[in-house]
């Protein structure tokens, strides 16, 4: 694609050329004719291996994109492109960045990702106009000591390297808004992280952190913090200072409790603490008045505090695979809740207040110890009610019955009561024992649910298929899959 400016000698005034995905093995010679006018050149996704000298005579170039080629060397002649504002050489086979890249004084955006680069030249710290620097998927072990001299940086990506530390000069990056250090080997986040007042996004997932420094609370503009997949055992109370935080990702760590300061995060929308070791949930959680998604799957929770009912904006609550024996009645205050998932706990009953959740579309209570459901559930407009791990239909037929112990009218069906305890399935393999399934299940069917079983249904339950085949546990589909 060529774009010309309207002059008499149009063939000499081309400003823009896009030859991406053109199966090129070398740069066409005719491109070099436009050295006086060409400003943007895109040669992405070809098979280029070498960069000819003619390319570096295009001194008016402002954008040069060479991503997804087979380039093994970035020549030192690149320094002649003094007007270059954007350079993309990502996903090539470049081993080194030339030292004289420091002469690209106009460069604002640079992407070197996906190359086998093990170190950065000190010259890169002279690119003082850089606002975006992308260095993902390299092999960097350290950064230059003067890296912090890139004081105009607003976005810095260093994901999937082997960094263990950051140079002290990092504290000079006071304009940095986005910092991605995910998938490195950082064990300690330095205190000077609190010296980055403009920071809005901080990605530290997939490192070796055991905690965060107290200074993290100084990041008043931070909206997203991801420290998932680390070794974090505790968080400082100073986390309460993150007054702008909307997304907090703490998944796959070693947390046994959350700091009380979590309740001060009144702008928090998403909190993910799945796959930790939480024994209890702080009552202060009720202070997170903007929370819309709370994920607590795979912890050791035995109860949920009544203050959870204060989360009036909550739409998704997932407490799968914990040790809950009951839910607080205040759960009925979650008027905007659309998904409630408490599968694989130890629930014996659900509070009748669940019937107040008029926006609830998905209720997953499979893998518990429920004998029946509260009558109030009939008031809900559910699209999925999951009572068993391998339930065939999202909405089983419910029938009214009488609780023999209390005399209350309740709901039941052929999937209730749930009597598949941990002894009847292997959590490591996700397999049910068919013999335990049959002989544990049938004796406890309520009179009404027994009447509901047709001869055909009984035959299916007792068929050879059920007696001799293992049943693989599948995740219950939620609203988005219906």
Image (cartoon, helix red, strand yellow):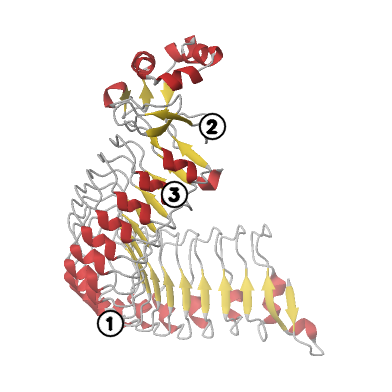
- Between the residue at mark 1 and the residue at mark 2, the CA separation in whole angstroms equals 58 Å
Q: Quadrant of the C terminus?
A: top right
For residue 62, side relative to residue 236 (left or right):
right
| Image quarter of residue 320 | top left
Q: Earlier in the sequence, mark 1 or mark 2?
A: 1
- Between the residue at mark 3 and the residue at mark 1, the CA separation in whole angstroms equals 44 Å
Q: In the rendered image, which residue does mark 1 sit on?
A: 172
- Callout 2 crowding tier (Cα within 10 Å): few <14, some 14–19, many ≥20: few
| Image quarter of residue 10 | bottom right
Q: In the rendered image, which residue does mark 3 sit on?
A: 339
Q: Earlier in the sequence, mark 2 or mark 3?
A: 3
Residue with the most extreme front position: 407
Q: In the rendered image, which residue does mark 2 sit on?
A: 393
Residue under the image location 30 percent in, 37 percent down: 345
Q: Position of residue 70 (x, y in %)?
A: 54, 58
Foreground label between 1 and 2:
2
- Callout 1 crowding tier (Cα within 10 Å): few <14, some 14–19, many ≥20: some
Residue 421 higher or lower than 194, as above or below? above
């Amino acid at each position: 694609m060529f774009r010309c400016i309207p002059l008499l000698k149009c063939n000499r005034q081309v400003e823009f050329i896009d030859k991406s995905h053109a199966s090129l093995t070398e740069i066409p010679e005719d491109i070099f004719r436009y050295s006086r006018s060409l400003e943007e050149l895109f040669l992405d996704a070809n098979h280029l291996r070498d960069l000819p000298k003619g390319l570096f005579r295009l001194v008016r170039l402002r954008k040069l994109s060479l991503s997804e080629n087979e380039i093994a060397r970035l020549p030192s002649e690149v320094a002649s492109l003094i007007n270059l504002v954007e350079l993309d050489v990502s996903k090539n086979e470049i081993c080194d960045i030339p030292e004289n890249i420091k002469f690209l004084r106009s460069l604002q955006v640079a992407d070197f990702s996906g190359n086998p680069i093990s170190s950065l030249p000190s010259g890169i710290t002279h690119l003082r106009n850089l606002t975006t620097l992308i260095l993902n998927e390299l092999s960097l072990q350290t950064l230059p000591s003067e890296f912090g001299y890139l004081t105009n940086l607003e976005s810095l990506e260093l994901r999937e390297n082997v960094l263990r530390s950051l140079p002290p000069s990092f504290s000079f990056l006071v304009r940095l808004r986005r910092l991605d250090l995910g998938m490195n080997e950082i064990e300690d986040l330095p205190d000077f992280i609190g010296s980055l007042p403009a920071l809005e996004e901080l990605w530290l997932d997939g490192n070796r952190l055991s905690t965060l420094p107290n200074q993290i609370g100084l990041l008043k503009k931070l909206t997203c913090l991801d420290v998932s997949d680390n070794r974090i055992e505790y968080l400082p109370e100073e986390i309460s200072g993150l007054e702008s935080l909307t997304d907090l990702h703490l998944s796959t760590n070693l947390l046994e409790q959350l700091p009380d300061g979590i309740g001060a995060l009144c702008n928090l929308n998403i909190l993910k603490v799945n796959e930790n070791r939480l024994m209890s949930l702080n009552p202060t959680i009720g202070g997170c008045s903007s929370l819309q998604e709370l994920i607590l799957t795979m912890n050791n929770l035995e109860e949920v505090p009544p203050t959870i009912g204060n989360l009036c904006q909550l739409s998704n609550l997932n407490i799968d695979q914990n040790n809950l024996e009951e839910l607080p009645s205040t759960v009925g205050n979650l008027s905007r809740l659309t998904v409630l998932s408490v599968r694989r706990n130890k629930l014996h009953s659900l509070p009748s207040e669940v019937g107040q959740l008029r926006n609830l579309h998905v209720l997953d209570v499979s893998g518990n110890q429920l004998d029946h459901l509260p009558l109030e559930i009939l008031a809900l407009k559910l699209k999925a009610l999951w009572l068993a791990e391998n339930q065939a239909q999202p909405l089983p037929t419910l029938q009214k019955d009488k609780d023999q112990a209390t005399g209350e009218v309740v709901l039941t069906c052929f999937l209730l009561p749930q009597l598949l305890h941990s002894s009847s399935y292997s959590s490591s393999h996700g397999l049910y024992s068919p013999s335990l399934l049959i002989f544990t299940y049938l004796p406890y069917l309520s009179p009404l649910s027994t009447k509901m079983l047709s001869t055909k249904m009984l035959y299916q339950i007792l068929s050879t298929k059920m007696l001799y085949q293992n049943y693989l546990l599948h995740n219950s589909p939620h609203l988005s899959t219906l």
